[in-house]
Image (cartoon, rainbow, N blue to C red):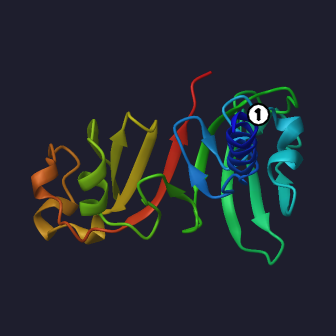
Amino acid sequence: MYKLIFSLLTVSTLLVSCKKQDPFLINKQNIGLLTDSTQVKDLKLAFPNDSIVKFIGGDEFTGSINDIEVFEKGGKKLLTLTPRQALDSTSYIKEIQVLDARYKTSKGISTLSTFKDITSHYKISRISNLINSLVLSVDALNTSFIIDKKDLPANLRFDMSLKIEAAQIPNDAKIKYFFINWNK
């Protein structure tokens, strides 16, 4: 009897541990196989089936711009990664811009989601009013959602000095893209 129970527990443990990780799932410290501890030199391991394009500046005028773009084999841009240090293969990723709608949080938020979807699942920590967009910060995910001001009422679109409250944003305002910020 004990052998049967032990065998069932072992088989169920193996089945659960063999479950593949979703390559498009976003959590606070990982996106698929990419984690907040992944170094630039290890990106091929996190994106084995995708193309990674690194921008290499030719001189010091480029400053610290060193974005890395991830494309799927068909050419569709998935993510833009920004390392902490330019031109350093041991640098960690500081910021990820999510462009592809297949990337979703555990609560189903993606670039196809709306303002109502965000507020239904997460607490908005801050709303920043920029020239052409609003930035909605969600500290629980280290994420900033970008909403185009074209989705706002006309009286909120042009004055950057306005303090915009969540109640003023239409529920159907769409996410343009979003950023995940990792502070390591």
Q: What residue type is labelled 1?
A: Thr
Q: Taking 93 as reference, is 50 above or below it?
A: below
Is residue 153 toward the left or the right of residue 131 in the image? left
Q: Image quadrant for the C terminus?
A: top right
Q: Image quadrant for the N terminus?
A: top right
Is residue 112 toward the left or the right of residue 88 in the image? left
Q: Where is residue 153 in the image (x, y as percent from the top left)?
A: 14, 69
Q: How many marks?
A: 1
Q: Where is residue 49 in the image (x, y as percent from the top left)?
A: 86, 63
The image quarter in which residue 103 lies: bottom right
Residue at 79%, 27% (x, y): give it: 91
Is residue 20 toward the left or the right of residue 165 in the image? right
Residue at 69%, 52% (x, y): give it: 21
Residue at 88%, 31% (x, y): give it: 89
Q: Taking 108 as reference, is 136 above or below it?
A: above
Q: Taking 171 as reference, is 127 above or below it?
A: above
Residue at 85%, 26% (x, y): give it: 90
Is residue 95 toward the left or the right of residue 84 in the image? left
- Neighbour tally class for label 1: few under 14, some 14-19, many 20 plus, Cα within 10 Å: some
- The residue indicated by pointer 1 is 38
Foreground residue among 3 and 19: 3
Q: Taking 7 as reference, is 113 above or below it?
A: below
Foreground residue among 14 and 139: 14
**Residue found farthest to the top:** 184
Q: Where is residue 174 in the image (x, y as percent from the top left)?
A: 34, 68
Q: Position of residue 140 (x, y in %)?
A: 39, 35
For numbered disc 1, what is the local secondary structure? loop
